Structure formats: structure tokens, C-alpha cells
Image: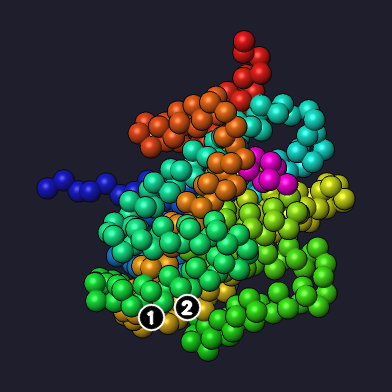
Amino acid sequence: MSRTPSPPPTWPAGDDRRPLAILLIFLRLGLTSFGGPIAHLGYFRDEFVRRRRWLSDTGYAELVALCQFLPGPASSQVGLALGLMRAGYRGALAAWVGFTLPSAVAMILFALGLASQSEAIPAGILQGLKVAAVAVVAQAVWGMASSLCPDRPRVTLMAGATVLVLLIPVIWIQILVLALAGLLGAWLFRATTPPPAAADALPTPIDPRAGLIWLAVFAILLVGLPLLVLLLPHQTLALLDAGYRAGSLVFGGGHVVLPLLQAEFVTQGWVDQERFLAGYGAAQAVPGPLFTFAAFLGASMFATDWGWLGAWLGGLLGLIAIFAPSFLLVAGVLPFWSRVRHLTPLRAALVGINAAVVGLLLAALYQPVWQSAILGPADFSLALLALVALIFWRVPPWLVVILCAGAGGLAPALP
């Protein structure tokens, strides 16, 4: 009987429990992980289950289930949890820095370029980036609706969420919609939510007392930051509050952060809508987590008045704000996950929330994405071709973004 070949050696060699080794492992993934959250989870499985054997397939599936249960960017939370289980808090920090750094640097540099050389960048390229955003968000709505809204009750929840958000365009309506969807989900889907599958227990380097402390810090910041902004109105505190709230309330993956960030940054006048959509389109062309879009927004806020130093400071603050809830929730829930996963009302509530999340993203597709980008037949045609390329030809998003930007740049020169 032939033996199964062992996995090839991986870089870096040596003890992969050291924070530096974890940093280098995730840095390589951060430089090469194109394709969005689902692709990231595939890269992680290949690296940490098949090659490094940090945990089993069923253990990895359980970790993914935990991170999909929590609000925030699921793939980044999986990376954080892997680092945490491997080397404690320093391992979690190393994993986050490695996976996030490449795309964060790219997005801050793009924000600096727009701030300092906006006239040098052809308007057609920026328009092409906005059209690419239309196709990417439409693809996300298509895929999420297929998996998260497969029946009439969930389609109805999705449509209701879209209608409420569009007809009541205030910041708090999105939070209210998610809360209502959770309550309705716990009522409507409790009887049909299947029990969780059996899985391996996850290594838990945090004791329950520490977990409760992290959850308390999460709640205090979520409630306290808005109050602090009211008492001490300042741009830095406002950025931290907006980013933290977005990172705390996003269910369903990276694209869903778009409506929350748009409601904060564009509605408040911190970033104009043109720049917002151009940055969102550019975020599709870089590897790593989509949440590094917050680095672009923070850099754009501070670059105008403070130059390059302000851009880097604003980008760092935006990153810390939007990813801080992920740290706190993963560390807080991991010690209790073996019990939480069996609570049927919570899992049923998540079914309703996920359906509403699709509705929020559909509303964002209409306003601001569609209304700001599709200005005529040429824009519609380019968006349609980009959508077909994404869904049916499986062209990677980064390539679609580059092609759309190129088409936009060439359009003024065409007869």
C-alpha cells in the first residue's frame, strides 16, 4: 500500500508557536490572499489544517462557525483566533498585524495619492473604480441572497430591511433593523434551526473570568464611545466611535460594512461620496481583509489638514477602531463557545439577522453605490460586463477592478 506523501515544508521553518513566526506566516498570507472572505478561509484551511496541522478539519469548521456567529470580519477573526490558540494574546496580535498590514498600507497610500494628486489621477479611472464597486457589491448580494435567503420568510425579511433603510435614511435605523430581525428570527426560525453538528473542542487559552472581562470592555466601549463624543466632540474620537460601532454591528462579512461606514463617513461629511466609492473599489484589488477600507477612510479624513503624517495616523486609528471589537469578542466568547453553540434561540436569531444583512447590502447597492456610479449607458454596460465576469467567468475581483479602472481611463479617449 502506498503511503500518503507528507505535506511540503512550510516557511518559516522552526517553532511556529513564537509570535515572530506567526507574524511571518500571516504576513505571507496577507500578501497573497486575494478573493475575499470565503477565499481567505480556504487559504487558512490549506495552511493551518492541511500543511501545519494546527487543528483538525472538524476543529477548523467549529472555529469558522464561531467567527460567523460573531459580528465582524469572519476571516480576520479566524486568523485572530488561530494566533490566540497558538501563542496567546501575542500570537493573536501577530496574526492580525501580519494578515492586515499589506492591504492597510496599500489603502493608506491610495488615500494619500487621492489627497495630494487628485487632479493628476484621470477622472475616468476613478469612475471605473466606482463602476467596479457596483459589480462587486451586486455579486455579494447575489451570493449572500442565494445562501442566506432561501425561503419566503427570509426573502421577506431581506426586502423589509431594504425598504426600511431606504425610506428612513438615518444612522440608527440600521441598528434597529438588525435588532428587529434578530427578534423575528428567534421567533420564526427556532423550530426549524437544526442542532449544531458534533465537532472537536477548541483549545481555549483564556479562562472564563478573563472572557467576561473582555466582553465587559466590549460593551463599555460600544456604549461609552458615543457618549464620550457627545461630551467631547473631536474628530479623533468621532473616528474611533464610528469605526468601533461598524466593527461591532456588522454581520455577514466584509461587504456588509459598506452601508454602516457610508452612513457614518459620507453622511457626516468626513469623506465625500466620490472618494468613498473609489476607495471601496480599490479595496477589492488588494489582498487581505476588506475591513482595511477603514484605513483608507481614516487616512482620507486626516490627510487634507495634516498631510502624510495625518494620513498614517488616521489610517492607524481607523484600523484599530474597526478591528478592536473582533479582538474583544473572540477573546470573550471563546471560553464559553461550547455552551453558547447549543442555544437554539441565539442561532435562530442569527438566521434572521443574516437575512436582514442581505437587505442592508441591497439598500447600499442602490444608494450610494448605484446612484453615484451609474451615470449613463456606458457605465451600465461596463458594470454588467464586470458582473458577468465575476459571477459566471469567475474572474478574480482584483483583476475586474483593474480592468474597470483601465476602461474608465480609456473611455474619454474613445470617439
Residue indicated by mark 2: 333
The residue range painted magenta reads 272-278
Callout 2 secondary element: helix
Let me know if residue 269 appears in the view.
yes
**Which label is found at residue 414?**
none
- Assign a secondary structure to mark 1: helix
Quick one: 166 or 239, which is closer to the camera?
166
Compared across the picture, whether 379 is left or right of 78 comes to right
State the image quarter where residue 20 is shown. bottom right
Q: How far across and down, in percent of the image, does residue 141 sit?
A: 43, 49
Q: Which residue occupies 73% across, 43% down?
A: 111
Q: Position of residue 163 (x, y in %)?
A: 48, 58
Disc 2 versus disc 1: distance between alpha carbons? 8 Å
Would you say the residues marked 2 and 1 are in contact, meaning their CB atoms lie under 8 Å apart? yes
Which disc number belongs to residue 340?
1
Which residue type carries mark 1? Answer: Val
Tell me, yes or no, whether the highlighted magenta stretch contains residue 274: yes
The quadrant holding residue 347 is bottom left
376 relative to 336, above or below: above
For residue 308, side relative to residue 139 (left or right): right
| Predominant SS of the magenta segment | helix
Residue 123 image offset from top left, x and y in percent:
70, 28
Q: Amino acid at mark 2?
A: Val
- Looking at the image, is 395 positioned above or below residue 228? above
Label whose residue precedes the other's in the sequence (2 or 1): 2
